[in-house]
Image (tube, rainbow, N blue to C red):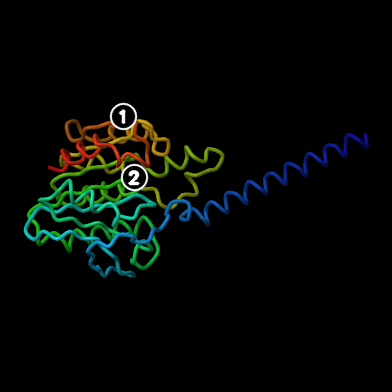
Amino acid sequence: MRTLRALRLMLLWTAAGLALLYLAGCGAMYVWQRSLLYFPQPARQAVASMTLPVDGATLQISVRAHPGAPAVLYFGGNAEDVSATMPQLAGLFPDHALYGMHYRGYGQSTGAPSESALHADARALYEHVRPGHPEIKVVGRSLGSGVAARLASEQPVARLVLITPYDSIENVAAGQYPWLPVRWLIRDRFDSAGLAGRIGVPTTLIAAERDTLIRPERTARLLAHFRPGVARLVNIPGAGHGDIGASPLYARALADAVR
């Protein structure tokens, strides 16, 4: 009997210890979740830039000026230095002005990134750029696809391009951390699927065939939320999430989508 009681007590303490560890893991996820989502990068390329004052911060915007021409607003990935992307964009869109936003904490931008801040900053950039250009086209990659989708759902734009996009960051995180109650803990959800029905401009989704971060089903579910005839999907064969930009097929698809 004593042995049985000792065994039960040991199991009880073990269960309690595991529960405490699980709760500690949940707490750590809640507190540190933004450090798992945002990876600020310095601006390493010497390209022209401007500063944009916004509420609570000052943003660095990489720029290729082209007054009076159509403009492309570019929102990059969570670990992307958009200054390094500007030369490729400049080669693909010689007849467009380019504006690449360095998120708060990225490049020389001040402040800390969050979903609400990124959306507000995107609107501020749009409002700053709009008076000087006849058309605004919006391109977002990975994390930035959620920023771009939100902007296109709220403002008149001519084209929308979403590169390696997701239906929501919430669903991506739930797939990566299935042992945690992510849907209860997450603060920055970036629910692009919930906004897709409000978007009426020609939209292109560019996906990487071998993407293991934003899996194909996440992009397919986003596509399914657009109204019929609004969005199309282009798959880049052999490409992964990080190297899609090196594919000539990607460059061609991006150029075709923006023109």
Disc 2/disc 1 C-alpha distance (Å): 17 Å
| Horizontal and vertical percent position of residue 243 | 35, 40
In the rendered structure, the answer to whether residue 132 lies left or right of residue 138 reads left
Q: How crowded is mark 2: few (under 14 residues within 10 Å), some or many (20 or more)?
A: many
Instruction: Establish if 59 lies above or below 145.
Output: below
Of the pair 6 and 31, the residue shown nearer to us:
31
Residue 164 horizontal/vertical position (percent): 32, 40
Residue 128: image tag = none
The quarter of the rendered structure image containing the C terminus is top left
User: On the rendered structure, is 79 left or right of 46?
Assistant: right
Residue at left 32%, top 40%?
165
Q: Which of 135 and 240 is in front in this view?
A: 240
Per the image, the residue denoted by label 1 is 237
Element class at badge 1: loop
Q: Which residue is drawn at 57% across and 53% down?
A: 27
The residue pinned by badge 2 equals: 142
Which three-letter amino acid code belongs to the residue tagged 1?
Pro
